[in-house]
Structure formats: C-alpha cells, structure tokens
Image (spheres, rainbow, N blue to C red):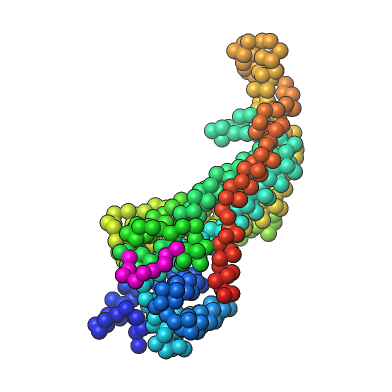
C-alpha cells in the first residue's frame, strides 16, 4: 500500500511514482532527526494556540522523543511505499496514537516542513564543519610555529623566486581558513532563520505563534515574509555551497602543494606512510593517494554552487518540484567535506619537513633579491644594485648569503600567528552556537 498522506483518490503508476519520488526516501534519512525536532516545536506551539489539548501534546511529544531515540540508534527507516520522512513520522504517530497523530500537520505544509528540516540539518552540519575547520587551522598553526626557522624556496610561475619558510607556508593556509570561516559564518547566519509558519508560501489562517517556534528551535530570527521564506529554498543551499566551496578551495590548493613538495624532485616534505600507496609494478613508489583524492573531492565540491544555481536560478517565486533535486547534490556534500578536513588535519599533524633543502645549490639564486636589498640598504641606488647582482649571476660569481632578516608583519621573521589566531577566535565567538545547543537540549528533554 502506498502511504501518501497528501494524496487524493487517484494513485500514481509505479513508473511515475519512481520518477517523482526519485532518491527522496534515501536522502530524507539525513533529515529524520531534524524533522522530529521541527514537529516537536510546531506541536508545542499548536497547543499554545488551542489546536491541541495539553494531554494530546504530552502523548505526541513522548512518542516523538521515542522516534528521535530510534533515529539516533539507527532503528528508523522510511518504509517502502511511504514517500518521505514527514509521511513516515506522521504514519508512525497515527499507528501508535490513533487520530491524534494526524493533528500535527495543522498550520503546516510539506513546503515549510522540509524547509525547517533542511535548515535544522544544515545548521548542525555547519557546526561540525566549523569544528573540523578549526582543528585543521590549529594543526597548521602548530606546524607553522614548529618549522618557522626552516627556509624553503618560494615560487612564482613555478620558478624559484625568493626565500620563503615553512612557517609562512603552513601559516598561509591557516590564515586562508579564517577567510573561509567568514563564509561559513555568513552561511550559518542565513540558515539560522525560522521558515515555519510560511506553510505553502502564503501563510495560514490559524493564529500561528511563529516567534514561539523560532525560540523553541534556537533560531536567531524568523524568515518574516512568508513568500520569501519559500523563495529562500535553493538560495539557502546555494549560499551554503559557496561556503563549502571556499573551504574546499583552500584544502585543494594545500593538497596540490603537498603532492608537489612530496615528490622526489622537490623532497621538501614527507607524508605519513599510511597516507601513501605503492605501485603494482614499481617497487620504489609511494604515491600521495590520500591527498590526490582529497584534491579531486575538493575540486568537485567547488562545483557545488553552480550545480545548485543551475537547478534553481530560473524559477519564479513559489514552490516547484525542481527544488527536490537540489538535495541530491547538497546533502552528501557535507560528509565529503568533513572527510577531507579530517584527512588533511591528520596528514598535516604527521607531515615531516626537510630541514636541509637549501644545501642544494640549485636554490642559491633565490637569495639574489636579498643581496640587492643589502646593497641598497648600504647606500647603492636600487637599480645599480640590481644590475650588479644580475651581472654577477651572469658571470657565475654570485655567492649567496643564506640568511634572511625579515621583520615586518607577516614576513618570515614575524609570522603574526598570534594575531591570526585571535582573528579566528573572534570569528568563532560570533557564531553563538551555545544558544542553539541550549534550545535543542531543552526541546529534547522537555
């Protein structure tokens, strides 16, 4: 039997059902916990405006908490013939409690129900991504401090250019993550607004207390205009996808650098053995497979905003079934990004640095600018100093001084890691995760 709680008397054929439901049952498993939390807040509000009795609310909340426990224990599944998670939860309530289970949908549409599910789920995923991003940031800063005195070549156009250091290299990626964290914060703030009460996008004749559900679920504010609340579907996923892509872009670049620096031609770093694999034919090989896969996954994630945009950007206002397809690319992206963050932090922690790179004379010429600056500081006009050092290089008489004395902010001798850490901490403090955690705990425990 097909359980479409919204269906009229005409039932779809099997092929039409397969096409329209698509992967919704599979993907709605992601949203089950959020669906129950949203329903708990909604029915608490319904009781406050007289659409449920206190006794009805009590039994419904108890059963929803039981379903929530089953979800977390891995014992919840969407049955064959049931279209989505919303229908499954309502079906379970109706089986166990009778007609009172049917009352939870008063004042709601599946449109605002899936909206709040997506927002609650995405909010939680963003919190996890933020935590893992901060872990990677800490590993990068630790390695920056550990190897701050070890010089390495800096490159432009993939040509040896000027002295750099591992302090700068690791530290640069740490600071990149602070900008990525700003994207995550902006995404989180846009997500953390309550769409419940917008119904199908035009509100309800019931006197819904939208501020109450906003407070119960720990949202900062509500999506006030009910039409905009529905227009926000797709836009929310697109904006979050840009934040995901920003983090992924940093990781992809880091992975490429590490693969390059790990190669025998560079031999700047050594990756942990367990993160490399051998060749089926060449016994000497140690391939950086983990970082190569990380790079590929992160490059794929950088296409996510365009995928979402192309699904939703030519739709007028109102709900359209097109939006269902966004879940297929959006929901799985978080696990992929989290995996990449975990793997990257692990490798950075165990990465070993070659402290004798500059023993190789091929890097001698990168100190030419240092010599030009030394002569200029001693009084020689810069253009004359440049010409002299250039002629010495051509004549093969240039002798490098393999020391650098950079003192300005952000340079080899003044990494500003403490300032960058403080910047990251200021950004993190502005998420205010504690408000959400307190609201969720209160709603769950009653």
Q: Is residue 430 left or right of residue 241?
A: right
Q: Which residues are magenta?
A: 203-211
Rendered location of residue 87, percent (x, y): 40, 79
In the image, 398 versus 104, the foreground residue is 104
Q: Quadrant of the C terminus?
A: bottom right
Q: Residue at x 35, y 88 (%)?
A: 1
Can I make out residue 430 in this image?
Answer: yes
> Which is nearer the eye, 428 or 48?
48
Q: Nearer the viewer, residue 127 or 177?
A: 127
On screen, residue 270 above or below 367: below
Q: Residue furthest left?
A: 10
Examine the rendered structure and indicate whether residue 16 appears above or below residue 328: below
Total numbered badges shown on the rendered structure: 0
Q: Observer-nearest residue: 247 or 278?
A: 247
**Can residue 334 be seen?**
no
Decide if residue 61 is on the left or right side of residue 7.
Answer: right
Residue 39 x %, y %: 46, 74
In the image, taking residue 299 as reference, residue 150 lies left or right, namely right
Q: Residue 259's spot in the image, x, y percent?
A: 60, 48
Residue for point 55% across, 44% down: 179
Q: Is residue 110 magenta?
A: no
- Quarter occupied by residue 235: bottom left
């Amino acid at each position: 039997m097909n359980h479409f709680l919204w269906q009229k008397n005409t039932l779809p054929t099997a092929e039409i059902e397969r096409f329209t439901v698509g992967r919704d049952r599979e993907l709605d498993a992601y949203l089950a916990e959020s669906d129950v939390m949203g329903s708990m807040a909604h029915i608490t509000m319904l009781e406050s405006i007289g659409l449920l009795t206190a006794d009805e609310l009590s039994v419904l909340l108890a059963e929803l908490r039981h379903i929530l426990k089953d979800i977390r224990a891995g014992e919840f599944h969407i049955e064959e013939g049931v279209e989505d998670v919303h229908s499954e939860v309502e079906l379970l309530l109706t089986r166990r409690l009778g007609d009172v289970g049917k009352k939870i949908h008063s004042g709601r549409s599946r449109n605002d129900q899936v909206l709040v599910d997506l927002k609650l789920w995405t909010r939680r995923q963003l919190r996890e991504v933020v935590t893992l991003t901060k872990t990677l940031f800490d590993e990068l800063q630790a390695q920056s401090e550990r190897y701050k005195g070890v010089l390495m070549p800096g490159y432009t156009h993939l040509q040896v250019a000027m002295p750099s250091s591992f302090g700068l290299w690791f530290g640069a990626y740490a600071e990149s993550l602070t900008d990525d964290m700003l994207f995550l914060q902006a995404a989180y703030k846009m997500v953390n607004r309550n769409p419940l009460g917008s119904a199908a996008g035009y509100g309800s004749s019931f006197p819904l207390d939208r501020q109450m559900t906003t407070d119960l679920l720990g949202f900062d504010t509500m999506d006030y205009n009910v039409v905009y609340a529905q227009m926000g579907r797709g836009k929310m996923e697109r904006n979050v996808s840009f934040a995901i892509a920003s983090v992924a872009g940093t990781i992809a670049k880091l992975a490429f650098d590490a693969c390059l620096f790990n190669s025998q031609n560079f031999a700047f770093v050594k990756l942990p053995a367990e993160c490399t694999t051998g060749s089926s034919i060449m016994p000497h090989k140690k391939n950086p497979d983990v970082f190569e896969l990380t790079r590929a996954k992160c490059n794929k994630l950088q296409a996510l905003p365009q995928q979402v945009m192309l699904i939703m950007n030519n739709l007028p206002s109102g709900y359209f079934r097109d939006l269902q397809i966004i879940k297929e690319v959006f929901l799985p992206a978080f696990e992929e990004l989290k995996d990449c963050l975990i793997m990257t932090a692990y490798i950075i922690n165990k990465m070993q640095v070659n402290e004798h790179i500059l023993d190789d004379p091929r890097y001698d010429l990168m100190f030419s600018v240092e010599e030009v600056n030394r002569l200029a500081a001693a009084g020689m006009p810069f253009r004359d100093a440049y010409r002299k050092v250039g002629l010495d290089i051509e004549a093969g008489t240039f002798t490098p001084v393999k020391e650098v004395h950079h003192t300005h902010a952000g340079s080899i001798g003044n990494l500003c890691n403490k300032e960058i850490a403080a910047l990251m901490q200021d950004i993190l403090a502005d998420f205010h995760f504690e408000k959400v955690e307190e609201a969720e705990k209160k709603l769950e425990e009653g």
